Image: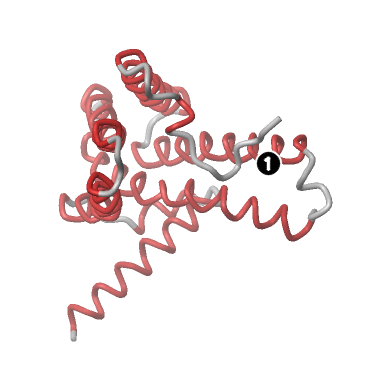
Amino acid sequence: MISNINSSNTIWRILYGMSLLAIGRREGITYFSGTVEAFYASLAPWLAFLLVDSLQIFFQPHKSIIVIKLLLSFCVLLLPPVISQVYAYKWGCMSFWLRYITAAMWCNWVMVLVPLVSVIFVLSLLPTLVSQSAVMKITFMAVVLYSVWIQWFVARIGLSVSGLRAAVLYATVLLANCALYGIVIFLSPHILLTDFLPPIGIPKK
């Protein structure tokens, strides 16, 4: 009974911390634990989704493509922890790293929800304009800019570094991701960039 109460409190603390960080409140970082167990817990949902996606191997004809995409997703998932740990060690802020990366992994869910909420918002308030590509492009760009901002903000607050260093960390992760995708597409010509793009919020001409 006590463990259930503690688990419930932990979940609410995480959700509250995410909501605070999502609106730019720096105290949101204090609602995350800086322990190895907390970090593993933040990884668990993403690993569960990868595990579910791996079941496609048994139902899809192009098994090699599915395996490549799963391995790529796994590498992309682990890039931020690896790269941020290197920078945290270099900048002398390793004592903040576990709490930061735990918060960053949980806040990735904000970047999943924001596109969905944005599209629903546009659909409900501007139904007659949804068919216009300009509106969807603006919505898409706003979501992209927000995603960049929240990752930069969590890095700056979580690691207690300057805005410039947070930008360097974000840019390094972004470049590493681009390099991974580039390598996969270059070595596997039958895989296109569009295979990795989410279906929501991509404007079409």
From the viewer's perspective, is residue 108 above or below residue 159? Answer: below
Towards the viewer: 178 or 10? 178
Q: What amino acid is labelled 1 in the image?
A: Thr
Within 10 Å of the Cα at label 1, are there few (<14), some (14-19), or many (20+) other Cα atoms? many
Left or right: residue 98 compared with residue 172 = left
Measuring from the top left, give residue 94's x and y in whole percent.
Answer: 21, 35
From the viewer's perspective, is residue 113 above or below residue 173? Answer: below
Q: How many marks?
A: 1
Quadrant of the rendering where the C terminus is positioned: top right
Residue at 29%, 42% in the rendered image: 101
Quadrant of the rendering where the N terminus is positioned: bottom left
The residue that label 1 is drawn on is: 139
Left or right: residue 179 compared with residue 96 = right
Q: Quadrant of residue 155?
A: top left
Question: Tag 1's secondary structure?
Answer: helix
Measuring from the top left, give residue 36's x and y in whole percent.
Answer: 16, 50
Measuring from the top left, give residue 49's x and y in whole percent.
Answer: 30, 52
